[in-house]
Amino acid sequence: MNAIWQVFRYEILRNGRRRGYLFTTFGFPIVAFLFLLVMQNINAGSAPEPEAAAEAITEFADFEGIEQAAYIDQSGLFTDVPEEPNLIRYTDLEAARADLIADAVDAVYVIDPDFADTGKVTLMVREVSLNGITTAPVYHLIYTEIGELITDQRILARMQDPVNLNTINLQREGTEQNEDTSFVLVYGFAILFAITVFGTSGYLMQSVIEEKENRLVEILITSIRPGQLLTGKILALGTLGLFQLIAWIGISYLLVNSQANGAALIPFLATLRIPTEPLPILAIYFVLGYLMFSAVFGGIGAISNSISEGPQLSVIFVLPSMVPFYLFPMFISQPDGTLPVLFSLFPLTAPLSMTMRLVSAPVPGWQIVISVILLALTTIALFWAAGRLFRVQSLLAGKVPKLRDLPRLVFEKA
Amino acid sequence: MVNAIHVDHVSKTYGSFRAVDDLSFEVNQGEIFAMLGPNGAGKSTTIRMILDILKPDVGTISVFGGPLTDAKKDRIGYLPEERGLYRNVKVLEMMTYLGTLKGMTQRNAQSRSKELLERLALIEHRDKKVSELSKGMQQKVQFAVTVLHDPDLIIVDEPFSGLDPVNTLVIKDLMLDMKQRGKAVVMSSHEMHQVEEMADRLLMINRGRQALYGPVDEVRRRYAIHAVIVEGQGAWEQLSGVQRVEPHKNGRNAAILHLAPNVTSNDLLATIAAAPNATIERFELAVPSLNDIFIQVAGRDE
């Protein structure tokens, strides 16, 4: 017990001081927050406020890059449009062309006689400029023409921005969030899970390989048992991973709820409602997921001979386990679909799948029970195998064993 | 007194390769015991079996009078042939950690580390990273780690490799000091003159089998040939009692005189003294160096 404690203590001090760990733990959430803040300000400048109430059309329409627009109505549809300072009506094409050349107007819209059927409009400009190509004046003509018929200005305004869509997924009834916020939650938790679990078990692998590469492992295992060494390391790095997770949630909570002048810095995030009910189950998945991958990574560390070999081998496990992440739209749209359910039962993909499902919708209890049991059994088996590899293989310097040699290494005696 | 190590008819096979073949020997407390043998003879495999890193296929090994337990591991210091230290960790921090793994308290491990660093003239480097030390310094730190917890048995594989003469002396002193305090020291080395100088007993392994075993002096005497080495002038062939003469390969002016069975070296010395034209600058028994014996034994089995 003392040996495990000594290893634990040392690994915590050693890995907890790594720059990479410190940045991922404290820097990453802050950088992510700043990124969101910047994105929000960029969006706020260009996009209309989605929740804005309908407003009456302004007297003078804004035609973006065009200051003075002119139109010739060959269709005879726009008879009721009053004269406006920045949208002048011409009847003579040559006069309009002359004024365009003389810089009196910036663009001339020639409404085709067949406009009602074809929507055809010819735009004449002096020179091509992206700002100058817009259909806004034509819209304005249409709205103004119809506006004479509609008495309620709000309906008219609503026509310009007819729908502010809020989708409710029937598979996730009972949750009140819209698709946007649950997208952020699922995405956020998946990333959080992947970075903490793979990050810390990656450090575990690194520290195992380092001791092999430095030839220290022979001294270590004549001092303590390989199992004690592995256990101490796994506990230490798991603790660091858990701390990272808590730090992230804590920092995110503080930042999301931070206010400037009484208003949330990122209003969008402030509408996030992080579900608290699945948190204990999420914790179980984090712990089991971490233990499973730490066994895998520890075992890989034991058979790798250099820092570059480890990650190459671990990709074999990391890639399939990340499949749910690539399919996350499916996890949002149909969390109870066949594939998401299968992925959340299969041990390698279960931690990530369940994390994504649990934050977006309630998961049937039987699925959780089966998935946890399968995951736990797999973890125990992998731990046993990793312990065997750690004992035999860590000493055999030279080359990485072939795949077909692995069963022999696991099952044979020292 | 209980033996530090007792190896009893131990064999170990890797696939079809017999690394250790029916090996038996003992190591006593208070002695320096040398393990010799060509590369691949089975020394490291034997050491790893003593340390319970590998299990023998047959035979038994007892350490301090029984199987190796966790508690007994704390009484052993091991310097593997392939040296290993954390590269990016400070010297004192690393030593303290490795000490605690041997059952020392944090405080105890730290103060003992400082004491050893002082003795090895490394104290001013205690806060440097291992990678910043010279190779010789790293070797000394490595040795310090081996004896940090004041073990009752140390097993050191090539303790002097990479050390300059001054540092060799420092390490040698530490080893002799351990012996004097009743500890058992097992050293595996290719440097025969060190073994000759320091070791009380030796075991030579060749192809996994015992080739020589016993006190160093006795082994050398056993391999002594019935001859003397002389340096000087004289018609050696014509002296009575000399069967044949061969030039000594190391001597500029030396020769090996093989004696007739009934002639002793004293007889020959008297004959030389009486011979009119003979002068001698050197006269010694042709006891072979361990190096010669090593080459002889290793070569014989080829």
Image: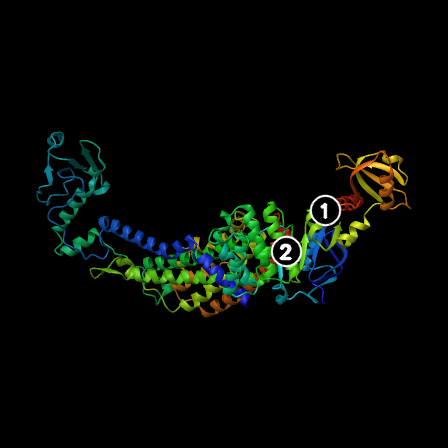
Going by the numbered disc 1, the residue's amino acid type is: Pro
Q: Which residue sits at x=35%, y=57%?
A: A184
Picture coordinates of residue A56, whole percent (x, y): 14, 53
Tag 2 subunit: B
Rendered image quadrant of residue A127: top left
Res. A353 mark: none
Mark 1 vs 2, N-terminal side: 1
Residue with the mark numbered 1? B38
Secondary structure at badge 2 equals helix
Label 1 and label 2: CA atoms lie apart by 23 Å
The percent position of residue A372, horizontal first and vertical second, equals: 50, 66
Task: Name which residue type carries label 2.
Answer: Met
Q: Which residue is mark 2?
A: B175
The quarter of the picture where residue A88 lies is top left
Which of the two residues, B251 or A66, is positioned nearer the viewer here?
Answer: B251
Residue B111 percent location from the top left of the image: 51, 62
